[in-house]
Amino acid sequence: IAEQGRRNRINMALQEMQALLPSSLLGATEAKSPESSAAQSSNSKAAKVESAIDYIKQLKQEVSEKDRFIESKDQEMEQLRKELAALRRSSSVGSAAEIAAQLKTEPSSSPNTDTGT
């Protein structure tokens, strides 16, 4: 009875894992080796586990790449903040007013701006 419970838990876990995997991964691994039904059932379980391992590795790689991308963007953002702070320190109140006036006279590229109401 304990052995049957263990097998049931394993089979339920395999089914749940299969539901989490993309269907494209499962179809490719199950077609690897056509064997007898008992061996194929066992191989199918092994194929599901192998597919899960491959998928987890793929996800880890994607996460790592995204982490590197975010880190580079964080560094870029920090550099831009420093440049902005330096520009603010170096500009005087008069030149800031000149820049604001220049921005008001330039046509807006936004299609949502409506000057007539």
Image (tube, rainbow, N blue to C red):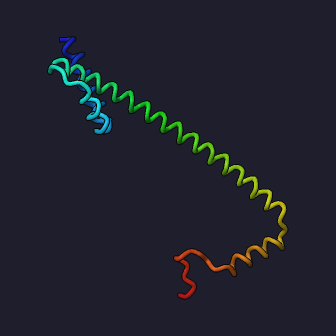
Left or right: residue 83 versus residue 106 is right
Picture residue at 20% right of the left edge, 24% below the top = 34
Looking at the image, which is closer to me, 40 or 18? Answer: 40
Q: Quadrant of residue 92?
A: bottom right
Q: Quadrant of the N terminus?
A: top left
Q: Quadrant of residue 103?
A: bottom right
Picture residue at 39% right of the left edge, 29% below the top = 54
Left or right: residue 59 versus residue 29 is right
Picture residue at 74% right of the left edge, 78% below the top = 101
How many tags in the picture? 0
Picture residue at 50% right of the left edge, 38% below the top = 63
Looking at the image, which is closer to me, 98 or 57? Answer: 57
Task: Please state the horizontal and vertical placement of residue 100, each as a whole percent of the image.
Answer: 73, 74
Q: Is residue 105 above or below residue 52?
A: below
Q: State the residue lying farthest toward the left.
A: 37
Q: State the residue lying farthest toward the top.
A: 2
Q: Quadrant of residue 11?
A: top left
Looking at the image, which is closer to me, 103 or 93? Answer: 103
Task: Please state the horizontal and vertical placement of residue 41, each as a whole percent of the image.
Answer: 19, 22
Left or right: residue 10 versus residue 96 is left
Task: Please state the horizontal and vertical placement of residue 35, each as a whole percent of the image.
Answer: 18, 21
Left or right: residue 59 versus residue 27 is right
Looking at the image, which is closer to me, 4 or 111? Answer: 111
Q: Is residue 46 above or below residue 77?
A: above
